Amino acid sequence: MSKGGDVVLLDFWASPFCMRVQIALSEKGVSYEARQEDLFGGKSELLLKSNPIYQKVPVFLHNGKPLCESTVIVGYIDETWTSPPLLPPCPYGRAQARFWADYIDKKLFDAVRDVVLSKGEATEAAKKELIEILKVLEGGLGERDFFGGKAFGFADIIAIPSTCWFLAAGKLGNFQVEAEFPKISGWIKRCMHKESVAKIIPDPEKIYEFVLMMRKMQGIDQ
Amino acid sequence: MSKGGDVVLLDFWASPFCMRVQIALSEKGVSYEARQEDLFGGKSELLLKSNPIYQKVPVFLHNGKPLCESTVIVGYIDETWTSPPLLPPCPYGRAQARFWADYIDKKLFDAVRDVVLSKGEATEAAKKELIEILKVLEGGLGERDFFGGKAFGFADIIAIPSTCWFLAAGKLGNFQVEAEFPKISGWIKRCMHKESVAKIIPDPEKIYEFVLMMRKMQGIDQ
């Protein structure tokens, strides 16, 4: 049992939503058991019982009590294990971090997924949408090191996991995030220098292989 | 100037998102200036400058510093004017309230809008979606008085403003929320007994008239 009780994550390795929870736990130094769910063969009874509304990973169980939705879970982790804090101390800074987390949560991964799991004109439309989002994020980052300012925090944890899907999006959408968005690229590098991030984020080549398998399963590729 | 500084809301009377902010301010006893935006004639320079990403109401200005997105603003209000608290004291209760606020924010008003601003098969599909959401909310409420438990709070503030659009949804979708969802109906009545809610929520008949005007403007009705 870890500091602060029994912590279990119903997990799937390629899910950016699950990676958010794992990075938050790593930042806090909380040990936990990550149980891989078989999303294709059949979800566990515990997942279906704990998340009846969405029936999705991540599900977080703290001393048996379930929580769902990754941004809610990361907020809970920040309030339960208070050091180091993931949100700035002042209400205005906290609200700004929550604004960016909310924007990223609503937009970024959906756009990435729409690029990698489509073809033809649909891919072009999704790529256009993703580039618009990346322009907004490039502006939001500005001259700051992280979305919360000088320190890695809440909005960075919400954003960084989707970036390991950028290689697949770039290959299938024929563009390079690194070349076209220098501020985002710098921010990704800074995040990846953190051990809590580097040890959780999978190799983008593995995500690309997973995407190719998904495309075959969904009949997008032969 | 109100307690805690100069508070301005860029507002639109029929927007449930603006009503959330107004109810939160009323609960806290904060006086403020609500400036009506002309969403059809042209948005103000202040709105466009303060919310360049979404260009939408509500925009909240506290001593001139802008915040956007209603759930972010309500969270800021709760952290800035701390009494009475809108979230429960324990992290798990807070996370549950945030889960419901997030579900409601993602689903409820979009479904209501899709019912009232559509016709034919699209209205039927939107009505089916709205009824599914209301079933989930009926289950989520269970035997509790409010979404946060015994006290009116964060998730209730996020949810209640959409309910003044239910009359229009019922008339245009041919169903009655009151008859079909007794727990939701009881919860609406309990919320409307609160002065902070009753004084903000507009007459549903006025919303219905507004919807009819919007339908004409959008060419849905002749």
Image: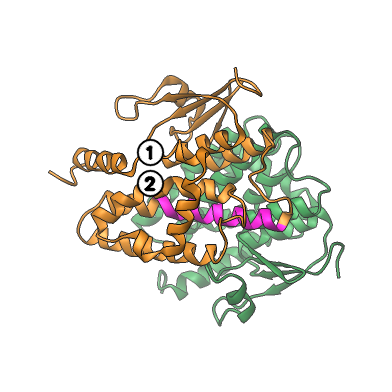
Chain colours: A orange, B green
Question: Which residue: 71% across, 74% down?
Answer: B35
Question: Which residue: 55% across, 71% down?
Answer: B52
Front residue (pair B20, A170): A170
- Visible in this render: residue B175? no
Disc 2 versus disc 1: distance between alpha carbons? 7 Å
Residue B20: within the magenta?
no
**Residue with the most extreme top position:** A1
Q: Mark 2 — residue? A: A164
For the residue marked with disc 1, what is the amino acid?
Answer: Pro
Give the vertical position of A9 relative to B157 (above or below): above
Counting from the top left corner in percent of width and height, residue A173 is at: 26, 58
| Chain of the residue where label 1 is placed in the rendered structure | A
- Category of crowding for the residue at label 2, using alpha-carbon neighbours closer than 10 angstroms: few (below 14), some (14–19), many (at least 20): many
Q: Earlier in the sequence, mark 2 or mark 1?
A: 2
Q: Which residues are magenta?
A: A92-109
Q: Mark 1 — residue? A: A202
